[in-house]
Image: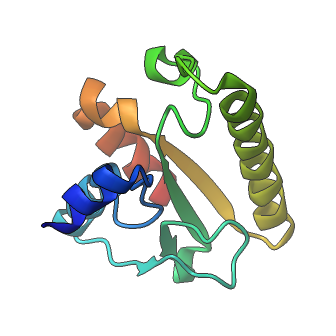
Amino acid sequence: MSDATEIKRRGVAAVRSKNTKPEMAVRRMLHAQGYRYRLHRTDLPGSPDLVFPSRKKVIFVNGCFWHGHSCKNGSRRPPSNTSYWLPKIARNVERDAKNISSLEVLGWQSLTVWECELKRSPEELRSRITRFLG
């Protein structure tokens, strides 16, 4: 039995926090443009997905649903167990804002890339990231 089948059978969530499909797409995009970065620096608030130490800039790649984005997927409400999920998503949003503020205090600039941006307009996203990185 595969790991995925076992996870489904036991009803355990298989939600990743690192190396997600959207994160990997952003990483491939930036690497192809010649950018080099560090991954998931745990010594920085929020453990940013991509870290550019010489520029003092970080990028978070967030899933719309999990981080409460204002798009269609982020506005979607879970069909069950809402008493758990709605406060959980609200805590995620609050935690994200706190992490970004903490990074600013430390002199780091941050950019949040949303999962929906990759699907909707990858070229526009590429331009936005390039402007951010300078």
Is residue 71 shown to the viewer in this render? yes
Camera-side residue of 73 and 88: 88
87 left or right of 105?
left
Camera-side residue of 46 and 75: 75
Camera-side residue of 102 and 8: 8
Q: Position of residue 72 (x, y in %)?
A: 46, 14
Q: Quadrant of the N terminus?
A: bottom left
Residue at coordinates 76% horizontally, 59% vertically from top-left?
99
77 left or right of 89?
left
Furthest residue toward left? 1
Residue at coordinates 50% horizontally, 18% vertically from top-left?
71
Residue 93 versus residue 45 in the image, above or below: above
96 left or right of 125?
right
Q: Position of residue 55 (x, y in %)?
A: 55, 74
Is residue 121 shown to the viewer in this render? no
Residue 26 versus residue 63 in the image, above or below: below
Q: Position of residue 94 (x, y in %)?
A: 80, 43
Camera-side residue of 67 and 51: 67
